[in-house]
Image (cartoon, grey):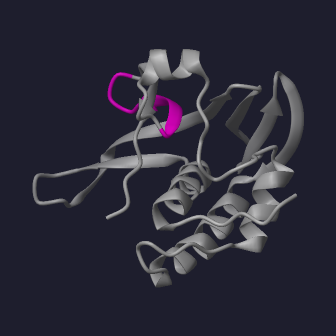
């Protein structure tokens, strides 16, 4: 495949995707931005609903080890440990930090890893139906469970680099 050349914002989408699957949880915070360990959402899966395929990355725990199962159109592609996602997210984060805003770069080890999971680009390419359902600006579709009421929802989120 061709070498991916993307800017900070585009690589940030891949970073968020990998960090969420690696960590598996997003914590709430106080109005002073102090982490609240009792309020969080658990990541159940991340969906990449693209025009030519449906990729689902589902987190699960087996014998106290967190894993992510990658599936394409309902068929399992690969199972990896969640910490592996965090490791690649950190590699990408370190590269993003050094990249000037408008410049593009390649990150070969991250590209190889994402391609092994069926991903063709760090930037999500939503299908028309996904755009209609989750919003045209959606970069990541997450199914999560709330720690307070244990409700499960699937929502689209936009990723922005600051």
Which residue is outermost to the left? 31
Q: Which image quadrant is residue 22 in?
A: bottom right
Residue 64 is a magenta residue = no
**Residue drawn at 46 percent across, 28 percent down:** 145
Question: Image height check: is 131 above or below 31?
Answer: above
Q: Position of residue 153 (x, y in %)?
A: 45, 21
Q: Which image quadrant is residue 59 in?
A: top right
Left or right of 30 on screen, residue 96: right
Which residue is outermost to the bottom? 98
**Residue drawn at 73 percent across, 44 percent down:** 68
Question: Image height check: is 60 above or below 143?
Answer: below
Residue 20 seen in render: yes
Image quadrant for the N terminus? bottom right
Q: Which image quadrant is residue 6 in?
A: bottom right
Left or right of 129 on screen, residue 162: left
Q: Position of residue 69 (x, y in %)?
A: 78, 39
Image: magenta residue range: 139-149
Image quadrant for the C terminus? bottom left
- Front in this rendered view, residue 111 or 38: 111
**Residue drawn at 88 percent across, 32 percent down:** 76
Q: Position of residue 92 (x, y in %)?
A: 60, 71
Q: Main secondary structure of the magenta part?
A: strand
- Front in this rendered view, residue 134 or 125: 125
Residue 153 seen in render: no
């Amino acid at each position: 495949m061709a070498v991916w050349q993307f800017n900070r914002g585009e690589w940030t989408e891949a970073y968020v995707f990998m960090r969420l699957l690696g960590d598996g949880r997003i914590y709430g915070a106080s109005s002073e931005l102090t982490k609240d360990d009792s309020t969080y959402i658990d990541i159940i899966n991340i969906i990449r609903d693209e025009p030519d395929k449906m990729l689902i990355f589902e987190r699960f725990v087996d014998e106290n080890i967190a894993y992510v199962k990658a599936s394409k159109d309902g068929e399992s592609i690969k199972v990896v440990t969640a910490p592996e996602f965090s490791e690649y997210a950190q590699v990408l984060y370190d590269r993003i930090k050094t990249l000037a805003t408008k410049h593009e770069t390649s990150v070969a080890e991250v590209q190889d890893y994402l391609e092994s999971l069926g991903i063709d680009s760090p930037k999500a390419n939503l299908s028309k139906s996904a755009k209609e359902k989750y919003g045209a600006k959606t970069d990541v579709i997450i199914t999560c469970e709330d720690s307070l009421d244990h409700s499960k929802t699937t929502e689209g989120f936009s990723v922005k680099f600051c």
